[in-house]
Structure formats: structure tokens, C-alpha cells
Amino acid sequence: MSTPAITIAFTPAAQAVLNRYADLPQRIRGGIAVGLREQNQLTVAHIQRQYLSFSKSSPPVPEGLRVQSNRLRASIRATDPRISGDEITTSIGTNVKYAVIHEFGGVFTVTKKPGTVRLRTDRGGNLLRQGKNGKLAIFAKNTHKSAKEVAFAGSTYTVTYPARAPIRHGIEDCAADYTRRISRNIVEAMKP
């Protein structure tokens, strides 16, 4: 799956500095890398705070994820900027496998195998119930004498996950900050 790239524009002052060179001097490339590294750390914090910190007890939200275990939120990292000629690349992501479904969305097919469960009954053989409406059966342990085995059929269903894109949204939110920080570093790198 191809990850969309986000392009960062430069301020007019920074663009004027860049236009003077056919090949970027090392100090400009270094300044851009430093600016990317600094802004990446701020962007990671923004993603964690704005898109991956909704309360576990709140309902699902379309623009981010609720905290379940903190695993995904704590795993967001930025790569160190890599300079190759005049190209400088970096990325923000995670190594948590289930992050991809939250970032890009998708459809899963779930298959439940058929089986049996042991449910509690009263002495008359009627299922014991629980819950507000008395609709939930009560599972029986092996030690319960009043119980019956109930078979259930297997089933297959699909689950659709929407693309919440917390990482992409966070980077897009910070695009103007990247422009300011990197442009400032370009101008500062060329000051005598």
C-alpha cells in the first residue's frame, strides 16, 4: 500500500535562498534536516494528543482513536531525516500491526466456528437470565449441577473499519508549522 506524501512549501524568503543554488550547500541540507527533526517531534506529540487520546469510556469518534492500552499511542515515532543529494526524506509512523487498519480502513471477514456452551438452569430446566431485561443467559461452571449444553451454529460476518488516519491528519495539521520551521532554518543557515 502506497503511503501518501505530504509536500511542504517554503516561505518566499526561504525560496529566494534556495533559488540561488543549483546544488544545495551542505549547511542548507543540514538546516532542513534539523528543522524536520524538531518539527517531527512536535508533530508526534500533536498526533498522540489530538488523535490518539480519546477516553476509553467515550463513544468511538470518526477523527481518532480511544485509548485502550496506550500501545499504539506510545509507539508513534519519526524517522531521522535522511539526506541523499538534494533530497531529504523523513516519515512518521508506527510498528504496531493493527495501526494500518485504523490509518487506511478496511474490511475483515470474521468466521465463528460452531460449538456448544454450558448454561445455568433452575431446577425446572429453565435457563437462568441476567441483565436489565433478563435477556442474557448465565454461563455454568463444571461444578454447577443445574445446567444444560446449548449448541450454536457457526457464522460469518464482515466488519468494516473506517479510515481514521490519525497520523496523516496530524501531519496535515502541522504542515504550516513545517513550512515556518524549515524555511527559518534555510534562511538562518545562509546568514554569515
Image: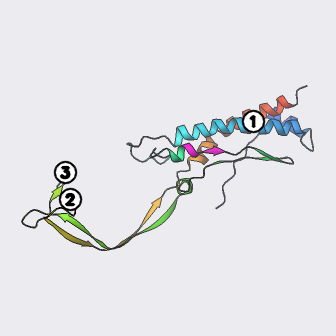
**Residue flagged by tag 3: what amino acid is it?**
Lys
Of labels 3 and 1, earlier in sequence is 1
- Image depth: mark 2 or mark 3 in front: 2
In the rendered view, would you say 134 is above or below 114?
Answer: above
Secondary structure category for the residue under label 2: loop
Mark whose residue sits in front, 2 or 1: 2
Q: Position of residue 103 (x, y in %)?
A: 56, 53
Instruction: Say whether disc 2 or disc 3 marks the residue closer to the N-terminus.
Output: 3
- Rendered-image quadrant of the N terminus: bottom right
Q: Which mark is residue 132?
A: 3
Q: How far, Cα to Cα, is label 2 from label 3?
A: 13 Å
Q: Residue at x 21, y 71 (%)?
A: 149
Q: Is residue 8 left or right of residue 69?
A: right
Mark 2 vs 1: CB contact within 8 A: no
Whether residue 76 appears in magenta in the rendering, the answer is: yes
The residue stretch that appears in magenta: 74-78
